[in-house]
Amino acid sequence: MNVFEKIKKSWWVILSFIMFLNGFGFIYIAVKYNNKNWLLEGVMYELPWFLYFVFYALFGAPSVIPMNQSMLILLLAVLLLFVGIIRSVWVAIKLADVYENEEKYTISSTSLNNSKNSNENKDFNSNLACCLCALVIFFVFIVVIL
């Protein structure tokens, strides 16, 4: 795969550099590759911007002195912007490796031993637990700010 094709498949990284759209790149790539973790990551990068606009609508423009709720959320959003930029470049580099070595990453069918224990563990959804944990962290953050 040449460089132009890699860049063409990694256009979503540009969204990470745009201030209010940094999570939408991860949401796009998550939908494209059916990856729930990237979807949660994209939502986590967008949530502070959403909260900032809500607090801006309720309390007005942020002021540095005294530091109000919307200023703290803006600070968190900008911090997550930088984290999102680094993370999106990292994911794009890993995906470029997958593009080059597709035969290495293909899934071959195997027969699995379905035991009683493996069927019992299907009830626990780790993605739901991760999402709930992230929401609890944001709610605790909001409570601390208020």
Image (cartoon, rainbow, N blue to C red):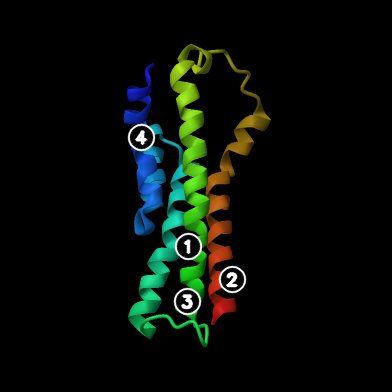
Q: Is residue 116 visible?
A: yes
Which disc is residue 56 wearing?
none
Disc number lying in front (4 or 1): 1
From the viewer's perspective, is 4 left or right of 35?
A: left
Residue at 53% from the left image edge and 74% from the top image edge:
142
- Estimate how packed mark 3 is, as few (under 14), some (14 to 19) or many (20 or more) residues with alpha carbons within 10 Å: some
**Height in image: 75 above or below 6?**
below
Q: Is residue 125 visible?
A: no
Which disc is residue 140 wearing?
2
The disc, 2 or 1, on the residue closer to the chain's N-terminal end is 1
Disc number lying in front (3 or 2): 3
Residue at 40% from the left image edge and 52% from the top image edge:
22
Residue that mark 1 sits on: 78
Disc number lying in front (3 or 4): 3
Image quarter (top left, top right, bottom left or bottom right) of the N terminus: top left
The disc, 2 or 4, on the residue closer to the chain's N-terminal end is 4
The disc, 3 or 2, on the residue closer to the chain's N-terminal end is 3
User: What secondary structure is marked by label 3?
Assistant: helix
- Estimate how packed mark 4 is, as few (under 14), some (14 to 19) or many (20 or more) residues with alpha carbons within 10 Å: few
Which disc is residue 32 wearing?
4
Which disc is residue 71 wearing?
3
Rounded to the nearest whole Å, what is the CA distance between mark 4 and mark 1?
26 Å
